[in-house]
Amino acid sequence: MRNFIKKVSFLFFILIFLHALSSVAVAQETDAEKLKRLTDEITTYENELKRLATQADTLSNVIAQFNAQIKLTQLKISQTEEKINLLSGRIVQLEDSLLVLKEAYNERVSRTYKMSRFTEKYLLFISMANINDVVNSFNYLKKLQEADISLLDRLKNAQDLYQTEKGNQENLQEDLETQKASLSSQMNAKAKLLEQTKNDEKKYQSLIAAAKSELEAIQAIIAGKGVEEMVGHVSEGEKIASLIEGASCNSSGTHLHFIVADSQVAQNPFSFLRSGVNYENCSGSSCGSGDGDPFNPSGSWNWPINEKIKFFQGYGSTWAIRNSWVGRIYNFHNGIDIQPEGSKDVKAVKAGNLYRGSYTGYNSCRLRYVRVDHDDSNIDTFYLHINYQ
């Protein structure tokens, strides 16, 4: 029995020892090996994302893509941090080398100066007997000067390399901050999707269908394919409609989809709307998150709704397109989505002829809108998800 216990104890010791060796082996992974491993893992997840993109458009597939994208971004963050650590080590070595080179250069300059001064004084007492000494001193001084030039070149090259590496470090640090912001957006977008769908495939498919229908309707409306009737002339700031409360045809909630078009070509509404309004930016992962679309109006028009303005989506390539399921439907947002605080009145931004219109698309969804044909230009403004005045 005693021998058995000894054998068991010995085997247990061996297992612990082997585990310790394994831990040391892992810990001894070189910097180059770690970077290669991270690069290989990044490639694996990039390929996985490509594969998932070819699969059926289901909620489970979208969640799988979010998970793969989140893991990919985490790996890129680790890769960038490792590069920064390696670069920091090289920069410290360069700083040490620069210090040594500067000290050596200063010493060279001092010796060269002393040697040249000595040679000048020695020339006053020169005689034919010691001409060889003078020649030797001159040659030695010349070699010192050549060494000084070489050392100066090395010093300059080291300084240039140091500045380059410092610049690379700053660029990597900026990349790291961008990657961390992307990771936060991706995680928030996944949470937002799960909240919207309650992890229900039917709800997800309903969202997809509504988005496709809205895209079709909006493109048709801008192209002049809506059914319209002229109401009459309206003045700037006059009430022309009111927002539909809650969900409606092609809309998951109360908001105004505001479009500016010049000769049927969509323009950025922020180029026309005035700045200085009270607003809350909810176009990112959450209201006030700071990762949403830029709110940068620069024009002179008054807004079509009352302040405080809640901003849900901007113009062009938006946060929603880059980070959420809507990017599977469209890659460019042709207006802005906004909501007023309080009154749901919608007002004309400029004087012109008012038209009431609608477009019936997918699932017999009849999207209502009003259009103002501006008096002073070829511009039309469209106001969607509204009830007629």
Image (tube, rainbow, N blue to C red):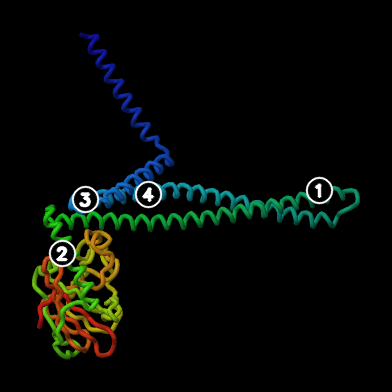
Q: Which of marks 4 and 3 is in front?
A: 3
Mark 3 neighbour density, 10 Å: few (under 14) some (14–19) many (20 or more)? some
Q: Find the distance from the CA under tag 2 to the CA under tag 1.
A: 93 Å
Which amino acid is tagged 3? Asn
Image disc number at residue 21: none
The residue beneath circle 1 is 136
Q: In this view, does 378 lie above or below 13?
A: below
Closer to us: 309 or 209 = 209
Q: Find the distance from the CA under tag 2 to the CA under tag 4.
A: 42 Å
> Could you tell whether 364 is left or right of 77 in the image?
left
Q: Which of marks 1 and 3 is in front?
A: 3
Image disc number at residue 61: 3
Q: Which of marks 1 and 3 is nearer the N terminus?
A: 3
Which amino acid is tagged 4? Glu
Q: In this view, does 35 lie above or below 322?
A: above
Q: Earlier in the sequence, mark 2 or mark 1?
A: 1
Percent position (x, y) of residue 334? 26, 72
Q: Quadrant location of residue 3? A: top left
Q: In this view, does 165 lie above or below 346?
A: above
The residue beneath circle 4 is 81
* Quarter of the picture holding the C terminus: bottom left
The residue drawn where x is 16% and y is 81% is 228
The residue drawn where x is 34% and y is 58% is 178
> Could you tell whether 167 is left or right of 324 in the image?
right
Which amino acid is tagged 2? Ala
Q: Find the distance from the CA under tag 4 to the CA under tag 1.
A: 56 Å
Q: Find the distance from the CA under tag 4 to the CA under tag 3.
A: 30 Å
